Image (cartoon, rainbow, N blue to C red):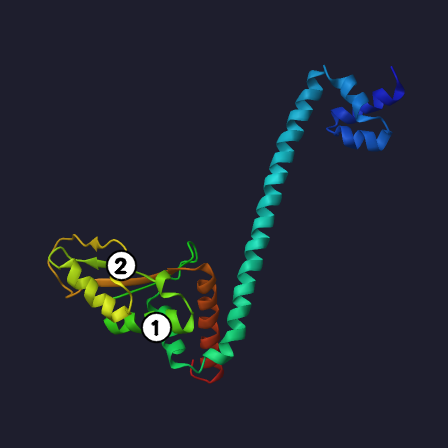
Amino acid sequence: MRKDKKLAIVLRKNGKSYSDISQELGIPKSTMHYWFRDAGWSKKIKAQQNVSARALSGKSIAAYQRQRWERWRQMHQNEAREQFPTLKSNPLFLAGIMLYWGEGDHARRGGQVRLTNTDARMISIFSKFFKEICHIPIVKIRPALFIYPDLEEKACKKYWSRASGISIRQFQKTQILKGRHPTKRLSYGVCTLHVNSGALKEKLFIWEELWYKEFQDAGVA
């Protein structure tokens, strides 16, 4: 048996690929394929290498996606930091940040910016915050109602439409609250405003942090 073939067998049984062996011994991959094409042990090694390659490829893709996500987040967070010095003196900006900080949905997953309340004044302010501070097109702001069975849905929608300045046509399906006491406790139910925007959510987190730091630096907190 050729000396280089013996060495190739040793390297192959140690889990080396054809490419590795070819680079180390200078043997063409086609030659090794011919040598080992009928060897069951070599086929098992190839199968193991294929599994490892797929796993490595999956990890590489996942790492790339994480890096891409982090770059995307950093881009919007940096934009929020650049905008803050100009926005912080705007009363509507401050009101919106405080409302979201206290009443908003802070779950990062899903990328929804959402605020729920029973007070029409808060819904009105937050709707203006969306439109005038965040520059969200009004057609992308989607209200949704939660009402008790004895409330008239049409009247509730009109009420919250006036408060938010958003057309009834944009309202999502109303949810009926069926609890132990299916009678009204709130005259017009509960209203939620939400926008699908992961970018805005990243900005809101930064704006909250920066505003709190303003308070700390001023000796308030």
Name the residue at 42% across, 69% down: 135
- Residue under the image location 71 percent in, 21 percent down: 42
Measured Cα–Cα span from mark 2 to mark 1:
18 Å
Q: Secondary structure at mark 1?
A: helix
The secondary element bearing badge 2 is classed as helix
- The location of residue 215, given as percent across then percent down, is 45, 81
Q: Residue at x 56, y 57 (%)?
A: 70
Mark 1, other Cα within 10 Å: few <14 / some 14–19 / many ≥20:
many
Q: Work out whether 157 lies above or below 49.
A: below
Q: How many marks?
A: 2
Place of residue 154 in the rendered image (x, y in percent of width and height, measured from the top left) = 17, 60
Picture quarter containing residue 221?
Answer: bottom left
Q: Which residue is mark 2?
A: 169
Q: Amino acid at mark 2?
A: Arg
Q: Which residue is mark 1?
A: 128
- Residue drawn at (46%, 78%) of the image: 87
State the mark number for residue 87: none
